[in-house]
Image: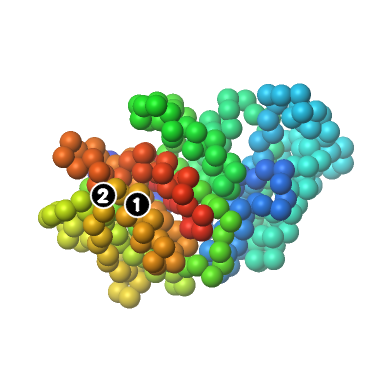
């Protein structure tokens, strides 16, 4: 099945039946106790060593305290870290590598980059994501606060223009502290192109991950004749990734808002991930049931257990 208009993703998103090695860009801070993005990868994949991880640390320099931290540089060998590294960043990087190593991630499959902030943390992260052709940008919850601020600007046009200017073509995974007991993906559908990208992304990531199922979810605001069509289209696309049968479920729920309906299903279903298109198709008569940047912003602020996969 060939989808028109999905050229923005790397070509490897279109291959299917043989699960491929994925490459994740994981942002890390100086706080070695959190590292939620790394923790999520270790809990979600049975063997993270099947894939590749690049750790990205961005050091802020916009105030005296942070500038002082930047000057506390590690003077020893770089030990596989690209760029100048502060003492605290080095501690966080090696803690992350230790965690990945415990989940069978080989040293040669882990890279690390450290950079001083140039255009703002969000733009710097998205810029690296677009240059590296990563399969996902994995943000710990603290890193996502800056992203949340961006989504909550007064007009959606600001959000869209910032993301467009930053060349955001890579799915964003926003990870609060993971709960290892949670499994499976809640895949939220509407009739937008971004929603199809979310289906394609989930299928690509979960190919070969037999421990997780996918629940196709459509939030409706009343009578909606599109639900069956959305389910069939999503199932056909997941089938190109060799996903089907007892790994795919369907659910429909009525609600006054998409975000509230999704959160209600998350509470009931105990999912590890909720996935959706970053921007839904805006329709004058269906604004409340269209997944859009506003829905994403609400979910970022409310999610405490599940990770959020947003696909542009």
Residue nearer the viewer, 266 or 249? 266
Residue at the (65%, 51%) spot, across then down? 35
Residue nearer the viewer, 101 or 251? 251
| Pointers 1 and 2 in contact (C-beta within 8 Å) | yes
Residue at the (62%, 58%) spot, across then down? 39
Q: Secondary structure at mark 2?
A: loop
Q: Is residue 275 above or below residue 209?
A: above
Q: Is residue 169 visible?
A: yes
* Residue with the mark numbered 1: 260
Residue at the (55%, 39%) spot, across then down? 145
Cα separation, mark 1 vs mark 2, equals: 8 Å
In x, y percent, where is residue 156?
A: 35, 30
Q: How are the colours assigned in the image?
A: rainbow
* Residue with the mark numbered 2: 256
Where on the picture, by quarter, is residue 287? Answer: top left
Q: Secondary structure at mark 1?
A: helix
Q: Which residue is at the far right?
A: 75
In x, y percent, where is residue 214?
A: 36, 65
In x, y percent, where is residue 189?
A: 28, 53
Where on the picture, by quarter, is residue 271? Answer: bottom left
Q: Is residue 3 above or below residue 245?
A: above
Image quadrant occupied by the C terminus: top left
Image quadrant occupied by the N terminus: bottom left
Q: Which residue is at the far front?
A: 256
Tell whether 240 sits left or right of 184: left
């Amino acid at each position: 099945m060939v989808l028109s208009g999905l050229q923005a993703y790397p070509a490897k998103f279109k291959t299917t039946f043989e699960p491929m090695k994925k490459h994740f860009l994981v942002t890390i801070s100086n706080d070695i106790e959190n590292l939620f993005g790394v923790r999520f990868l270790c809990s979600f994949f049975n063997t993270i060593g099947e894939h590749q991880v690049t750790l990205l640390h961005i050091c802020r320099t916009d105030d005296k305290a942070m500038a002082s931290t930047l000057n506390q540089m590690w003077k020893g060998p770089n030990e596989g870290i690209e760029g100048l590294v502060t003492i605290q960043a080095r501690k966080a990087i090696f803690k992350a590598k230790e965690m990945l190593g415990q989940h069978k991630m080989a040293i040669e499959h882990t890279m690390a980059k450290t950079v001083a902030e140039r255009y703002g943390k969000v733009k710097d992260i998205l810029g690296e994501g677009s240059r590296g052709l990563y399969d996902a940008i994995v943000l710990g919850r603290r890193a996502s606060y800056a992203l949340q601020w961006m989504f909550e600007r007064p007009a959606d046009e600001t959000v869209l223009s910032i993301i467009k200017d930053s060349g955001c073509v890579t799915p964003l995974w926003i990870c609060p502290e993971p709960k290892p007991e949670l499994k499976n993906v809640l895949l939220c559908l509407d009739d937008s192109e971004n929603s199809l990208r979310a289906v394609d992304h989930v299928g690509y990531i979960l190919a070969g991950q037999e421990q997780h199922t996918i629940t196709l979810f459509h939030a409706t605001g009343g009578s909606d004749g599109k639900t069956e069509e959305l389910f069939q289209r999503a199932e056909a696309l997941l089938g190109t990734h060799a996903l089907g049968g007892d790994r795919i479920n369907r659910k429909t729920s009525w609600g006054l808002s998409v975000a509230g309906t999704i959160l209600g299903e998350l509470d009931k279903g105990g999912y590890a991930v909720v996935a959706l298109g970053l921007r839904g198709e805006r329709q004058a008569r269906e604004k409340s049931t269209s997944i859009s940047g506003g829905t994403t912003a609400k979910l970022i602020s409310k999610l405490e257990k599940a990770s959020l996969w947003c696909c542009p």
